[in-house]
């Protein structure tokens, strides 16, 4: 299964195809703006090739969620934060098997995304309560609010970049599989 197929299967079932976003770089202090775009398998294919950068909203237009995510950041490239993030996120990953977790090292600075896929869609309010309980008040969560997808550009913090190429450090995500970190492109083919 190619990476774009794995992403489509995990994130973009029919009810959630309104949740696709594409990065549109800004010249304002290198800000990155994600804009809600119509679902396109071709755009996912471009994302898998590194020629487009896509993200997904945790809450769709119907205020429903099919996944939640926990975002561990290390904005200052601090080695002790990177080590603490890795230890904490692997512990969380191991404790959440009921949610078919996917653990992604999203950059080379010690940032991680822990994606948890819900057994069935749930309301944004319920998903927010669930993910905040799992995160325990530390890292950022998606959803971070129960707000559904709004007008373009969508600036709500419910959007998270999909596993793939990180435009800020030009590296590909790695996925934690059986205790090893695997390049996201190889994971897509597993």
Image: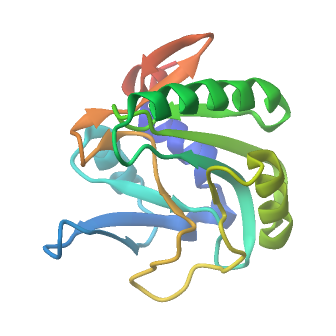
Question: At 78% across and 49% down in the image, what residue appears?
Answer: 136
Residue at left offset 42%, top offset 53%? 41
Most extreme residue toward the left, as rendered? 27
Tell me residue 132's x, y (percent).
77, 56
> Is 118 placed left or right of 1 in the picture?
right
Q: Residue reaching furthest bottom?
A: 151
Image location (x, y in percent) of residue 66: 73, 56
18 relative to 96, above or below? below
User: Going by the image, does 14 lie left or right of 129?
Assistant: left
What x and y, as percent, mark residue 20?
A: 48, 64
Q: Depth check: 6 or 29 in front?
A: 29
Query: Residue visible at 23% across and 40% down?
Result: 169
- Asked if residue 81 lies left or right of residue 58, the reply is left
Relative to 57, is 79 above or below?
above
Is 183 displayed left or right of 70 in the figure? left
Which quadrant would residue 166 be assigned to in this image?
Answer: top left
Residue 72 point in image, percent of width and height: 54, 44
* 31 or 35, nearer to the observer: 31
Q: How many marks?
A: 0
What's the image's color scheme? Answer: rainbow
Seen at 63% across and 62% down, the residue is: 58
């Amino acid at each position: 299964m190619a990476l774009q197929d794995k992403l489509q299967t995990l994130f973009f079932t029919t009810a959630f195809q309104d949740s696709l976003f594409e990065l549109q770089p800004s010249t304002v202090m290198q800000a990155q703006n994600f804009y809600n775009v119509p679902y396109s398998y071709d755009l996912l294919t471009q994302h898998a090739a590194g020629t487009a950068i896509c993200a997904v909203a945790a809450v769709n237009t119907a205020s429903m969620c099919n996944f939640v995510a926990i975002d561990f950041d290390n904005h200052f490239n601090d080695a002790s934060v990177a080590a603490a993030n890795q230890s904490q996120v692997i512990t969380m990953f191991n404790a959440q098997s009921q949610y078919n977790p996917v653990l992604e090292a999203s950059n080379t600075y010690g940032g991680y995304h822990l994606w948890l896929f819900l057994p069935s869609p749930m309301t944004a309010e319920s998903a927010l309560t669930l993910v905040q309980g799992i995160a325990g008040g530390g890292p950022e969560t998606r959803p971070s609010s129960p707000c559904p997808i709004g007008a373009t550009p969508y600036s709500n913090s419910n959007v998270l970049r999909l596993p793939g190429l990180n435009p800020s450090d030009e590296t590909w995500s790695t996925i934690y599989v059986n205790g090893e970190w695997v390049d996201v492109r190889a994971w897509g083919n597993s």
